Image: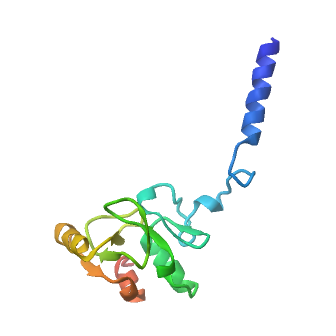
Amino acid sequence: MPSRLALAFTLALAFACGGEEDGGAATEEAARCAQCGMRVDMAPEWTAGLGDERFDAPKCLFRWAAEHDRAATEGWVMEYYSGERRPAFEVLYVAGSDVLSPMGDDLVPVEGRESAERFAADHGGRVVEPGAIDAALLASLDPR
């Protein structure tokens, strides 16, 4: 009987001490897109960020940045082919392709002009420079 009590105590202690590195349990907000509220860990290959904010897709990053008077290009995105984090201003984006993010039609981040053009040829869409992403382009990705 004492061993069961010790096991229960150990499990309770381990559970109570778990959580994030800051010493507390993860908050619901920490795992949600700053723009749409969707969980950002549902498809980590689409995750983006800007400062302390996290987004579930590049489209949400660019929308949030526009609404908060921030430059989305100061953020980062996950490059499509490598799956690695890249500064948002260092990649090109393919808009209108048949590759969908958790948010549907999106901006697919691709590193290098040749790779971006090959992606557009394979999946449709057009190659867009980061500075050319505006409200009209974002609206075209999500017709309402």
Q: Position of residue 107 (x, y in %)?
A: 36, 73
Instruction: Relative to 142, say whether 137 is above or below.
Output: below
Number of numbered discs visible in the structure rendering = 0
Q: Position of residue 45 (x, y in %)?
A: 41, 58
Q: Position of residue 63 (x, y in %)?
A: 48, 80
Query: Can you name the residue that lies furthest to the left here?
Result: 121
Instruction: Relative to 140, say whether 56 is above or below.
Output: above
Quadrant occupied by the C terminus: bottom left
Quarter of the image for residue 88 reads bottom left
Instruction: Relative to 127, say whether 97 is above or below.
Output: above
Residue at image point 38% right, 82% down: 130
Residue at image point 58% right, 84% down: 68
Q: Is residue 6 left or right of residue 100?
A: right
Query: Can you name the residue that lies furthest to the top here?
Result: 1
Q: Position of residue 28 (x, y in %)?
A: 65, 57
Q: Is residue 129 left or right of residue 43?
A: left
The colour scheme used to paint the residues is rainbow
Residue at image point 38% right, 59% down: 83
Quarter of the image for residue 1 reads top right
Frontmost residue, 28 versus 70: 70
